[in-house]
């Protein structure tokens, strides 16, 4: 008797085990597909990771999420982490401006706008940073006609702010914030990607300040960011645990070297130690960093090769755990963003983590503090302190910089523990023209095949919200296409 052939369950291979790959895999599993996820490194999470230092559980990469949408809180709820969602300390961050007397040149960062763009340049918290002349120039924003800036293609954040509000707002407020969030210069950032809707709102309301205020008001009340008690890396851990429990095949140490198509079927080739493995798939979701993605897609879609992103900057993070009771007073709130040109300080930002997060403060106990300093600015030369600086030298810079920025002298004897975490090429940013490039890449991939999709921070934009939203959306479209192609296939 002829044996009936049992059709195999449809498989999607997800390439890259960062947040984009993990979230995409989750969506595909929920849609009934068998999922194999291949991660090149020895661990999942990509730029979301944690480690224990000085007995404290600390995030190594992302340590907060934007609360402008419910994306991360609702994912945390779904993963059983809802009760760990916390808001940072309300004191907010400071900005360190150039000046002979560093303490006198540090100011609380005004909190009324977006990306450092003030809603009201005449507010005393803003004039304290930009000065009276800066405030007068910025006030022109209220009267200057909006003109083509609201509608023209390709406008950088820098051009928009400089034209509307002047150099003081740009260099003393917006540049430190953009540097801290994107490791990029405002002149290199596509305003529509980093502040979607800002230009359109400006066109409608007639000024940049009004638009910044409106966008801020439209965000949920409360702090602009949130965190998880115990660290953001728990999101990664919970995702991995859920995927494994649901039957996904998750593999670390497997670098994908090629994806090839034959008819409707895909073959994903990986390098696992010295062995090459070939994995058949009905669909593929590429969720690696940009350059790796383009290298994988290039042979199948030559036009994509021309869209290979430029190398992106990296960042070195020095974490100091210090026993300095004077820091209990949180002298610079939750931390300091450093404007360019501050003499004697190489760090571009300092997060006072035990001031920012009450859960960490409770764990560390009175007098003990966690300080995280970041190094590496766009345009740095090899002589600048940054990613290439050896650990010991970075540590000494960090101790000196922390003392200067917090206005509290600290010695090596005060340091309980320290380490350096390096993220090379991990901060893609939305450069000017990003949206057009992105649309071209998406169209090229879609033209090639509906059973191929691409996601990740390099396309979606930096930040967990953008990455998670995009991964869900792309995996959903891929699942729809596969369902349509074979509606009766077993799930
Ligand atoms: C220091 C730092 C701090 C940050 N802080 C915040 C923050 O506080 N809040 C926030 O919202 N965002 C933050 N971000 C940004 C956020 O972490 C990222 O936007 C997001 O995690 C990117 O996820 P991803 O999956 O797209 O990319 P990645 O995390 O880069 O993951 C890509 C994965 O693909 C794997 N891979 C690459 N090539 C291959 C291959 N050929 N085969 C198999 N696997 C491959 C890589 O090993 C990696 O694991 C921070 C980023 C950094 C670097």
Image (cartoon, rainbow, N blue to C red):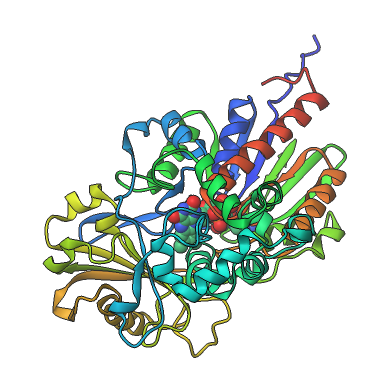
Quadrant location of the N terminus?
Answer: top right
Pick the quarter of the image with the C terminus.
Answer: top right
Residue 255 vs residue 161, the one in the foreground = 161
Residue 398 visible in the displayed image: no
- The residue lying toward the viewer, choosing from 393 and 333, is 333
Residue 174 location (% of width, % of height): 52, 66
Q: Is residue 183 above or below residue 249?
A: below
Please tell me which residue lies in front, 458 or 448: 458
Q: Decide: is 28 above or below 317.
A: above
**Which quarter of the picture shows residue 308?**
bottom right
* Residue in the picture at 82% in, 65% down: 306
State left or right for residue 429 relative to residue 19: right
Residue 259's x, y, as percent? 75, 51
Residue lying at the far top of the rendered structure: 1
**Image spot of residue 289 (x, y percent):** 62, 58
Q: Is residue 138 above or below residue 474?
A: below
Looking at the image, residue 393 sits to the left or right of residue 484; the answer is left
Which of the 4 quarters of the picture holds residue 473?
top right
Residue 35 in sight: yes
Left or right side of 287 for 100: left
């Amino acid at each position: 008797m002829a044996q009936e052939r049992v059709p195999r369950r449809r498989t999607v291979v997800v390439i890259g085990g960062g947040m984009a790959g993990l979230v995409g895999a989750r969506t595909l599993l929920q849609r009934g597909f068998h999922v194999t996820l291949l991660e090149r490194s020895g661990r999942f999470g990509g730029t979301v990771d944690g480690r224990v230092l000085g007995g404290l559980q600390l995030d190594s990469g992302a340590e907060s999420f934007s609360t402008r949408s419910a994306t991360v809180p609702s994912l945390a709820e779904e993963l059983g982490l809802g009760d760990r969602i916390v808001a940072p300390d309300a004191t907010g961050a400071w900005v360190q401006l150039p000046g002979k007397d560093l303490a006198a040149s540090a100011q609380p960062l005004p909190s009324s706008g977006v990306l450092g763009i003030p809603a009201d340049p005449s507010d005393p918290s803003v004039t304290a940073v930009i000065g009276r002349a800066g405030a007068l120039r910025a006030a022109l924003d209220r009267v200057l006609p909006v003109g083509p800036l609201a509608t023209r293609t390709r406008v950088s954040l820098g051009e928009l702010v400089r034209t509307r509000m002047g150099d003081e707002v740009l260099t003393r407020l917006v540049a430190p914030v953009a540097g801290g969030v994107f490791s990029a210069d405002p002149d290199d950032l596509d305003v529509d990607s980093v502040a979607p809707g800002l230009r359109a709102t400006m066109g409608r309301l007639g000024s940049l300040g009004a638009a910044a205020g409106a966008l801020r008001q439209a965000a949920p009340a409360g702090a602009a960011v949130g965190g998880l008690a115990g660290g953001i890396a728990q999101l990664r851990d919970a995702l991995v645990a859920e995927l494994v429990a649901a039957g996904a095949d998750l593999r670390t140490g497997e670098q994908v070297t090629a994806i090839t198509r034959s008819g409707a079927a895909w073959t994903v080739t990986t390098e696992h130690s010295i062995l090459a493995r070939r994995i058949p798939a009905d669909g593929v979701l590429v969720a690696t960093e940009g350059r790796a993605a383009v290298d994988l897609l290039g042979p199948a879609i030559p036009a994509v090769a021309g869209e290979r992103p430029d190398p992106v900057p990296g960042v070195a993070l020095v974490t100091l755990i210090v026993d300095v009771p004077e820091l209990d007073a949180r002298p610079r709130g939750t931390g300091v963003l450093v404007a360019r040109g501050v003499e004697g300080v190489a760090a571009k930002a300092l997060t006072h983590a035990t001031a920012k997060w009450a859960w960490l403060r409770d764990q560390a106990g009175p007098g003990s503090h966690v300080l995280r300093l970041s190094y590496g600015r766009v345009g740095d030369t090899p002589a600048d302190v940054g990613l290439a600086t050896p650990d010991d030298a970075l540590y000494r810079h960090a101790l000196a910089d922390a003392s200067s920025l917090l206005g509290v002298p600290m010695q090596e004897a005060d340091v309980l523990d320290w380490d350096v975490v390096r993220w090379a090429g991990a901060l893609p940013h939305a450069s000017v023209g990003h949206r057009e490039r992105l649309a071209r890449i998406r169209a090229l991939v879609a033209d090639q095949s509906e059973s191929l999709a691409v996601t990740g921070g390099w396309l979606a934009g930096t930040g967990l919200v953008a990455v998670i939203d995009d991964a869900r959306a792309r995996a959903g479209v891929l699942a729809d296409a596969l369902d349509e192609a074979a509606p009766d296939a077993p799930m």
